[in-house]
Image: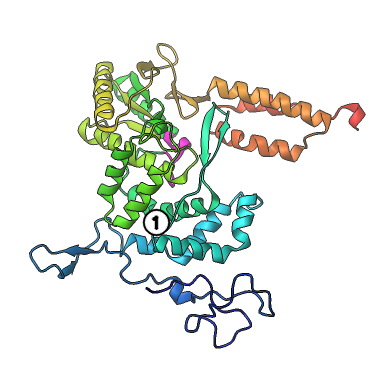
Amino acid sequence: MMRFPLRGGNWTNGSNAGLGALNLNNSRSNSNSNIGFRPALDDTARNTCLTGQCQCHIQKDAAASANAEKQIKPLDASSGCLYEQLIQFDGLLTAAYQCRKGKAHKASSLKFFNDLEENIIDLQNELTWGMYHASPYHQFYVFEPKRRLISAPNFRDRVVHRAIYNLIEPLFDKRFEYDSYACRNNKGTHKGADRAQLFIRQVERQHGKAYALKADISRYFSSIQHDVLKRLVGSKLKCQRTVSLLEYIIDTSPTDTPGVGIPLGNLTSQLFANVYLHELDRYAKHTLRAKRYVRYMDDFVFIHHDKQQLHQWRVDVEQFINGQLGLRTNQKTQVFPIGVGKGRALDFLGYRIYSTHRLLRKCSVKRMKTNMKKYRKKYAAGTMDIKAIQQKVQSWLGHASHANTFNLRTALFTKPFRRTNHEL
């Protein structure tokens, strides 16, 4: 059996170093005059997959002999084998740097980057030979805007997840419906809110009155069925080694019930969640033929001038997601008129949306007022500076700037911050 080396010659070795003559007798604890080490794989070898490792581009010809094979075009529209692309050194290295963004000073990031090249080669080896095993997740709770359990993978596992995501997300994104706005490039909450407001304006302009079917999936991430998700992923990717790795990530996710649920805090979970409800998007757009439908993760809305049509669509959607996906809507799902007078706002993506204007949610305003009082007290006591306060409020200001909030922002931020006298 060929030995896939972890380490080659040292920097001070001459012609006996590198791919041709591996200095394998040097142990990792070698403390002689040899300084450091030179990777056993040169640039070409690092980015060349061992032949015969993945057979996703080969299909057995049943009509021919057992040894006859023929080349077929990959069904996932990629060039070549997905798994061979996944285990490329440069792809894993890029994924590691992406995972470090915003977390460069955390212990897990520093530990991985302390031996970056060796850690990348170790991951490459494990993935190549099918020996990759995920580490336990780190779980904790967040309380804004509500209590949620977050399951964060180990840093090296995040590198694998990012490498997979970089490879397959563009393939899936091409198939997603236009009006799906969660976790996609050039989409997001603001564009989703803009689209919903546009639909309201269109219906009111054409029919005088707009109604909304506003729905939310009950405990969405905790309710995703593993067997259904794996079937959906497997039906869209031909590379079986890539599919097997994705199935392994799904099966090793921490869940309350075996075979049900994917974790919050996992990059691949975002993609899986969109793949899962893409079936609802297709059903809404192509079976129900709903022209004005918007979804952001597990929140979705239909806009229409006929209230009875929306009630019928609600029944159809609930039957579909329950029968095909094992999901159900929560108790807040309802049909209602949109309007300032005889109606109410569409509460969607953090905004109260009307055809003519947009406001923030009341809970968001209340939360920010409470935070501002807390920041003023800390600044007065000298435990918080202006720079830290600015960092805290910037994201909220960005969110608020997409609504009619000039007077609100003026009231919140015109009052100056002052130190108490004994701190001066």
Circle 1 packing at 10 Å, graded few (<14), some (14-19), many (20+), is some
Extreme-top residue of the structure:
342
| Vertical arrangement, residue 123 with respect to residue 190, above or below | below
Which x, y percent locates residue 191? Answer: 44, 38
Q: Indicate left or right for 206 with 354 as reference.
A: left
Is-magenta flag for residue 83? no
Q: Amino acid at mark 1?
A: Leu
Does the rendering let one see residue 264?
yes
| Vertical arrangement, residue 168 with respect to residue 62, above or below | above
Does the rendering let one see residue 416?
no
Q: Indicate left or right for 300 with 97 as reference.
A: left
Q: Quadrant of the C terminus?
A: top right
Which x, y percent locates residue 222? Answer: 41, 31
Which x, y percent locates residue 52? Answer: 30, 69
Is-magenta flag for residue 188? yes
Residue pictured at 42% horizontal, 58% vertical = 131
Which x, y percent locates residue 38? Answer: 57, 76
Residue pictured at 66% horizontal, 51% vertical = 105
Q: How is the model colour-coded? A: rainbow
Quadrant of the rendered image containing residue 368: top right
- The kind of secondary structure element at disc 1 is helix
| Vertical arrangement, residue 276 with respect to residue 72, above or below | above
The front one of 423 and 123 is 123
The front one of 194 and 157 is 157
Residue pictured at 42% horizontal, 51% vertical = 165
Q: Indicate left or right for 87 with 422 as reference.
A: left
Quadrant of the rendered image containing residue 219: top left
The front one of 349 and 244 is 244
Residue under circle 1? 167
Q: Indicate left or right for 306 with 248 as reference.
A: left
In the image, the segment drawn in magenta is 182-192
Magenta stretch mostly in which secondary structure? loop
